[in-house]
Image: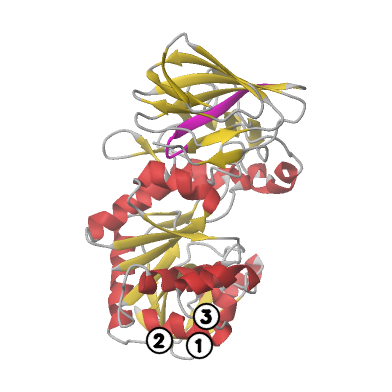
Amino acid sequence: MNIILLSGGSGKRLWPLSNDIRSKQFIQIFRGEDGKYESMVQRVYGQIRSVDSEANITVATSKSQVSSLQKQLGEEVGICVEPCRRDTYPAIMLATSYLHDVQGVSEDESVVVCPVDPYVNKDYFEAVKRLGELAEEGEARLLLMGIEPTYPSEKYGYIIPESNDELSRVREFKEKPDAETADGYIRQGALWNGGVFAYKLKYVLDKAHEMIDFTDYDDLYGKYEALTKISFDYAVVEKESDIKALRFSGQWKDLGTWNTLTEAMEENCIGDATLNDKCENVHVVNELDVPVLCMGLKDVVVSASPEGILVSDKEQSSYIKPFVDKLEGQVMFADKSWGSFRVLDIEEDSMTIKVTLHPGHSMNYHSHRHRDEVWTVISGSGRTVVDGMEQHVKAGDVITMQAGCRHTIIAETELKVIEVQLGKEINVHDKQKYELEK
């Protein structure tokens, strides 16, 4: 099975656990089989492997998510990076071209595209695999998965099939309706459009060549910024006549809000939190190193991270996005393939950050024009290179760099460093990278 997982978005509806670097699919709040917490993307990836251990999985994503994907899924995971965001159709075009030109997948093989973050069980990916098999057999030029609705939702588009058979031709599509209209669709046998598509690789590759003149993946990548922003539904699905839908009746949830996310949580508290016996239907996710105490609350979600603190009625939490859009500021934490960082303090002329490096990993060899830096090693050991001079460092060592000097640090064991940035202009753009001579 060739499967493309679409991984996008900033997940502002799950603030403060999500930010521009860590989207909702990377939040680790689900208990895995080993008892450790895992994220939506880790859960989905494991489910695919349990259904098809040889599946060729490629994640279509933005550059900002690559480090998180590699940290959570391993550095060998297939990743097709969009140079900029252009909606689902260009993303699927680029990923399909990547499969053909970079991975060598045949034009006659089927491809299944699905979101990276559905909350589902194993039977969902068994249906996904079958969808791919139907596409490869030529059952239709395009196949979709239709989710049997559990209520008249206003959040999803609807597929109107010609029959109630498990596999049916599609009569028409309906955009996101109001609740009353959705109820009418459901009485007609309508299905939720779960954003899962299957096709032979040649089908989308030919569509891509109709939209833009390009020779191969590299050429398409170079022209990507000029592509029209358009969804796969608008550009392809709603114009295709030879299309069928596979009915899926198992568990399927879109955990896009705190209200729906807490419904899937197995525990009321993650992190250091205490609820008294008067609390009802309260969930807490605490990523700070301070305790959270809740007394007598009902139907409330509390979430604390370095980005901020949310205390909300669960129903009202669905309307968080416009308020979060107004909260502009420094990204306060991020998980990377090489480790992580967390901002501890921001002053007018300084910023203090705790950096953790995994063994064998390092920062880029770089310099800053407008700031000095002071590193204090608090645990572990490694090496620094400052303007070409290398030295061994361990807990307690302090390294000082003036603006303009080139520097990096390489971890031999897990290495934790307090980095203090000093200057009038401290920002992410003040960084020049260099090749480090071996």
**The quadrant where residue 114 appears:** bottom left
Q: Which mark is residue 240?
A: 1
Instruction: Tell whether label 3 touches label 1 (CB within 8 Å).
Output: no
Q: Which residue is mark 3?
A: 214
Q: Nearer the viewer, residue 432 or 121?
A: 432
Instruction: Tell whether label 1 touches label 2 (CB within 8 Å).
Output: yes
Q: Nearer the viewer, residue 291 or 407?
A: 407
Determine the CA span between mark 3 and mark 2.
23 Å
- Residue type marked 1: Glu
- Residue type marked 3: Phe
Residue 130 in picture, x, y percent from top left? 28, 72
Q: Residue at x 31, y 72 (%)?
A: 104
Q: Residue at x 30, y 54 (%)?
A: 47
Q: Residues within 10 Å of mark 2 (few under 14, many from 20)?
A: some
Q: Nearer the viewer, residue 438 or 130?
A: 438
Q: Which mark is residue 141?
A: 2
Determine the CA span between mark 2 and mark 1.
8 Å
Quick check: 140 above or below 100?
below
Where disc 3 sits, the SS reads loop
Q: Residue at x 64, y 65 (%)?
A: 179
Q: Is residue 306 visible?
A: yes
Residue 110 in picture, x, y percent from top left? 33, 77
Residue 391 in picture, x, y percent from top left? 42, 19
Q: Is residue 147 visible?
A: no
How many numbered discs? Answer: 3
Boundaries of the magenta span: 336-346
Q: Residue farthest to the left?
A: 53
Tell me, yes or no, whether the highlighted magenta stretch contains residue 344: yes
Please say which color scheme the image uses: secondary structure
Q: Residues within 10 Å of mark 3 (few under 14, many from 20)?
A: some
